[in-house]
Image (cartoon, rainbow, N blue to C red):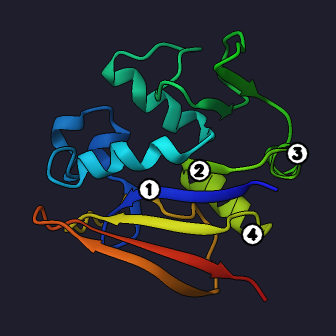
Amino acid sequence: MAEIIYHVAVSLDNFIADQGMIDGNIDKSLFLFEGDHVPDFLSDIQQYDAVLMGGKTYEFGFQFGAKPGEPGYKGIKHYIFSNSMQFESNEEVELVKEDAIEFIENLKQKENGKIWLCGGGALAGSLLKHKLINRLVLKVNPIMVGEGISLFGSEKPVYKLELVDIKQYSSGVFKAAYDIIYP
């Protein structure tokens, strides 16, 4: 059975995207896209066999030159969950328009290894509600943005977590990994 890991950058006030990112103006974002944490992130994502993304998270990559149907991360199978996007699925990128929970439950059962939940907040909230996320890896940026896309969308989870790893960077980012303890 595969393990789902929600590995995401987050502000101190629990947002995964600020207004600059939402508006498509990355220059106005407070999130740190450069620093000593970036090489570790690029190394970390090599452990994943597949990546799950909501449509808005996938579209964020278009600002960096990606196009619909192209992978945002080379060598990792992409599953994009969107009812509004239109492109042909291929070996690298599969557009999923069916029920995300049922699809991911089946994917988790039939696959082995690690599946990266890259974002978005609503998808993460739904997966957490259905107890499908095994681990959180939070790259906590030294910022507070006040509003944006919440870590778990509109869900208000109440779970205990077990800290399994923590690393601090000189950029001010720290990366904390937690296993979720479901009742």
Task: Give the amino acid type for the residue marked by disc 4 in the picture.
Answer: Lys
Residue 133, quarter of picture: bottom right
- Secondary structure beneath label 1: strand
Q: Residue furthest top?
A: 88
Crowd tier of the residue under label 1, counting other residues whose Cα lies within 10 Å: few below 14, some 14–19, many 20 or above: many
Residue 158, placed above or below residue 46? below
Q: Secondary structure at mark 2?
A: strand
Splitting the image into 4 quarters, where does residue 8 fall?
bottom left
Q: Which residue in the structure is indicated by mark 1?
A: 8
Q: Which residue, given by chain and number where applicable, does mark 4 sit on?
A: 129
How far apart in space, not on screen, are marks 3 and 2 (Cα)?
Answer: 17 Å
Residue under label 2, please give it. 117
Residue at (65% x, 21% y) in the render: 93
Give above or below for 85 relative to 39: above
Q: Which amino acid type corresponds to the residue marked 3 in the rendered image?
A: Lys
Reading the chain from its start, which is encountered first: label 3 or label 4?
3
Tell me the quadrant of the picture where the C terminus can be found: bottom right
Which labelled disc corresponds to residue 110? 3
Q: CA distance from mark 3 to mark 4?
A: 21 Å
Q: Position of residue 151 (x, y in %)?
A: 49, 63
Q: Amino acid at mark 1?
A: Val
Density class for disc 4 (Cα within 10 Å; few <14, some 14-19, many ≥20) is some
Given contact means CB atoms under 8 Å apart, are the residues at marks 3 and 4 in contact?
no
Circles 1 and 2, Cβ within 8 Å, touching? The answer is: yes
Q: Position of residue 59 (x, y in %)?
A: 48, 28
For the residues labelled 4 and 1, the Cα–Cα distance comes to 18 Å
Question: What is the distance, in whole Å, between disc 3 and disc 1 at their CAs?
Answer: 24 Å
Front of the two marks 3 and 2: 3
C-alpha span from label 4 to label 2: 14 Å
